[in-house]
Amino acid sequence: MANFDKLGKGGRHADRDRRGRILGSALLWGLNEAGRDDILVVDNLGSGEKWKNCVNRRYRDYLHKDAFLAAVTGGDNPFGTIEAIVHLGACSSTTETDAEYLMRNNFGYARAVARFALAHGARFVVASSAATYGDGSAGFDDDPDGLDALKPLNMYGYSKHLFDLWARREGLLGELASLKFFNIYGPNEYHKGDMRSVVCKAFKQIRETGRLKLFKSYRPEYPDGGQQRDFLYVKDAVAVMLWLLDHPEVNGIFNVGAGVARTWNDLAAAVFRGHGPRTGC
């Protein structure tokens, strides 16, 4: 069962929202490539074009995220044997100001699904975020002993941080995997609007104008475009999740990134190279 959210009899469950949709559709691809289609996809497809991410994928069934939450909190297990739940769904907008919504949709939902998965012997993998590290002044160590020192800068990061704190407090970090994803980019971002990765935005901007605008630096130690981030290709993130599904004995909090910080200028140069000889930044 995959809860991008992913489920299935002897299978996987997957639940997705915003960033979860790029991760979720890529994970669905990875599972299909591995010969798995015993998957329940959980999402809120709405009236947009998010459904297109699933057209070329194989899965057993689909369930709206509200119906899934009602099922996992109803006291019974209507799904049968569940092998794993991969919970990727969340509102990942760093500018979202509705704290009540984020507490309910991000923290509360993930906690409920975790309780259900562990109560029914299912492998549980959940997407966290590098946004939990705040301004980085407390470091980027994924050791759970350092959780109390982290001060997220936005409510999204805080909602993710709360889950890790809860799992540690309940003694569950030895029973699940919480993945602090860094800056993910790759296919199927078209639906995310302003929450698309800079790579996706840069590609569109360069294709349409031949130019690319980058963030101005307000810190003297970094020139404009010299700010650094860890950029991770979505299929590399999928490889990590698939490995964890195959190794349920590996649990805890894990940073998931490329492991190398690159500048925005590096990113811009790579996207320009991907467009061929056309220049004009």
Image (cartoon, rainbow, N blue to C red):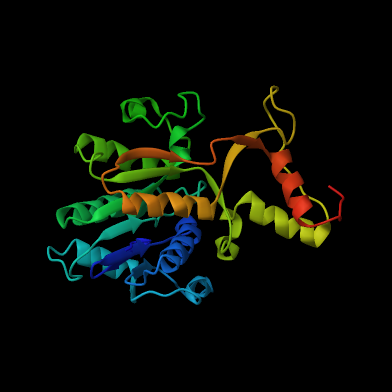
Q: Which residue is drawn at 21% across and 67% down?
A: 71
- Total numbered labels: 0
| Residue 154 in view, yes or no | no
Q: In which quarter of the image is residue 201?
A: bottom right
Q: Residue at x 50, y 23 (%)?
A: 137
Q: Where is residue 41 in the image (x, y as percent from the top left)?
A: 36, 69
Asked whether, in this view, residue 179 is left or right of residue 70, the answer is: right
**Left or right placement of residue 114 versus residue 219 in this view:** left
Give x and y (percent) for residue 211: 82, 52
Relative to 104, residue 67 above or below:
below
For image coordinates 33% across by 76% down, the residue present is: 61
Whether residue 11 is visible here, answered yes or no, is yes
Quick one: 55 or 154, which is closer to the camera?
A: 55
* Quadrant of the frame with the N terminus: bottom left
Q: In which quarter of the image is residue 168?
A: top left
- Judge left or right: residue 250 versus residue 130: left
> Eyeballing the image, is 36 above or below 134?
below
Instruction: Measuring from the top left, give residue 174's x and y in whole percent.
Output: 23, 39
Q: Is residue 212 left or right of residue 259?
A: right
The percent coordinates of residue 197 (x first, y second) are 60, 52
